[in-house]
């Protein structure tokens, strides 16, 4: 692919891409208005300890992780749009119930149902975006998922600000906000149903690939399995910002934690938007190994700064700068790789299986809770070094096309 095509501006979107990115923005606003505060809400409204709180928050991702392949296969078989509609209805219902339920057991069950809603929405949304990217000549296709990452960051700016403002006002108002955003997403899907359905290639036999074919195609691809494993490591570490870091701050800042954390989270989102374009340019000029090591090293520096934060609030904000660089480098890479290696008929299954990396969002908070209970020293030492396990996994490309770090067009493997 010519260099000029690889460097095409990320923000030039087709109508189909704008539609999907609009839905991703609503999804992001809903998620970040509530979920970053979920550990605090569970800690204050139930009798769960830190490891149990971490387990509940992480289980939302755990359900999506192990149900993702099933969701992806259904997407390939029946189509993305019907499953997305069902998932969005589930989101609205769950958040509506959270606004009114006060029993601890019911709160836990409802949080777990959010994972079920996610597995119905995410594989289909990513499959549609991948098809939309395939139809964009003159663009390095995989970079479309950097745009998606930027869209999620934009939602992360407004979401925590709303959630932080409403958290202590009233639980009804706090949970009504994500319910409203998901309802808006549902309306968008219903109104533009025909445009979304048109993104999927027509199937001559009226049905998608069988479940056996989808499972076989995904589990045989060692490149995909390596990407999933690397994603688990990245999400294991990344999950700490939304789970254990607020509890670590709570012990030091008390009732000021919600305000400080909301500012910290918004700073992260603003920096993520500002830094993604430079990261995209740099990623096309340095080797993949150097890029992944750069991302891991910045996460380590961030944990060191958070560890030093008792000596001054400024360390929290220094840490979030390093954190955002690491996040901006590493988080889009798995979706870029999956987009490039998945064939059209199996895109749903590939993106569905890739959701197994959400296992990191379960293991991360649970393990982080155990480590934080043991003390800050083991917590920060483990988290600051564990991230480097992703380097050999994300580099692993045993066969087939080898995508560039920037998401540019892959280099074809030699013909057999």
Image (tube, helix red, strand yellow):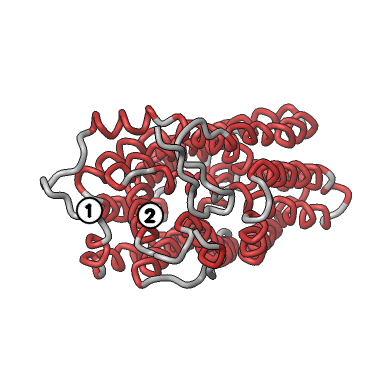
Closer to us: 201 or 56: 201
State which quarter of the image contains the C terminus: top left
Task: Name the residue: 74% across, 52% down.
Answer: 322
| Left or right for 261, reference 135 | right
Task: Name the residue: 66% across, 46% down.
Answer: 287
> Which mark is in front, 2 or 1?
2
Res. 105 in view: no
Task: Name the residue: 22% across, 53% down.
Answer: 82
Task: Name the residue that disc number 1 marks.
Answer: 82
Q: Is residue 270 above or below residue 96?
A: below
Q: Could you say whether the residue bearing mark 2 is in a helix, strand or loop? A: helix
Q: Is residue 148 above or below residue 40?
A: below
The image shows a total of numbered marks equal to 2
Q: Is residue 331 above or below residue 393?
A: below
User: Looking at the picture, how far across and down is residue 273, in whole percent?
Assistant: 61, 65
Q: How many residues crowd mark 1 within 10 Å: few (<14), some (14–19), many (20+)?
A: some
Residue found at the very far front of the displayed protein: 415
Distance of label 2 from label 1 (alpha carbons): 17 Å
Q: Specify the label residue 130 is tagged with.
A: 2
Closer to us: 190 or 115: 190
Q: Could you say whether the residue bearing mark 1 is in a helix, strand or loop? A: helix
């Amino acid at each position: 692919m010519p260099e000029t095509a690889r460097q095409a501006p990320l923000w030039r979107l087709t109508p189909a891409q704008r539609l999907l990115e609009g839905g991703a923005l609503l999804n992001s606003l809903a998620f970040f208005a509530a979920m970053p505060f979920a550990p605090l809400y569970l800690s204050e409204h139930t009798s769960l300890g830190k490891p149990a709180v971490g387990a509940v928050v992480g289980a939302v991702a755990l359900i999506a992780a192990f149900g993702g392949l099933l969701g992806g296969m259904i997407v390939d078989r029946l189509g993305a749009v019907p499953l997305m509609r069902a998932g969005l209805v589930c989101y609205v219902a769950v958040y509506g119930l959270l606004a009114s339920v006060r029993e601890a057991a019911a709160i836990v069950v409802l949080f777990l149902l959010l994972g079920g809603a996610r597995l119905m929405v995410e594989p289909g949304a990513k499959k549609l975006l991948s098809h939309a990217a395939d139809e964009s000549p003159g663009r390095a296709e995989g970079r479309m998922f950097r745009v998606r990452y930027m869209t999620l960051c934009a939602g992360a700016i407004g979401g925590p600000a709303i959630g932080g403002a409403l958290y202590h006002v009233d639980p009804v108002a706090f949970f009504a906000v994500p319910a409203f955003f998901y309802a808006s997403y549902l309306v968008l899907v219903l109104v533009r149903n025909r445009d979304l359905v048109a993104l999927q290639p027509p199937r001559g036999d009226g049905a998608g690939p069988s479940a056996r074919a989808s499972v076989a195609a995904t589990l045989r691809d060692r490149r995909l399995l390596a990407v999933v494993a690397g994603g688990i490591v990245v999400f294991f570490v990344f999950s700490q910002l939304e789970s254990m870091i607020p509890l670590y701050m709570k012990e030091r800042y008390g009732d000021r934690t919600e305000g400080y954390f909301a500012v910290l989270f918004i700073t992260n989102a603003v920096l993520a938007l500002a830094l993604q374009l430079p990261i995209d340019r740099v990623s096309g000029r340095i080797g993949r190994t150097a890029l992944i090591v750069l991302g891991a090293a910045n996460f380590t520096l961030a944990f060191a700064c958070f560890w030093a934060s008792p000596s001054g609030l400024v360390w929290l904000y220094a840490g979030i700068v390093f954190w955002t660089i690491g996040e901006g480098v590493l988080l889009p890479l798995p979706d870029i790789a999956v987009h490039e290696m998945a064939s059209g008929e199996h895109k749903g299954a590939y993106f569905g299986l890739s959701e197994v990396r959400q296992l990191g969002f379960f293991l991360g908070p649970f393990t982080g809770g155990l480590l934080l209970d043991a003390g800050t020293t083991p917590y920060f030492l483990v988290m600051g070094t564990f991230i480097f396990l992703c380097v050999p996994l994300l580099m692993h490309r045993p066969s087939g096309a080898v995508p560039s770090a920037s998401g540019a067009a892959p280099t074809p493997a030699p013909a057999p």
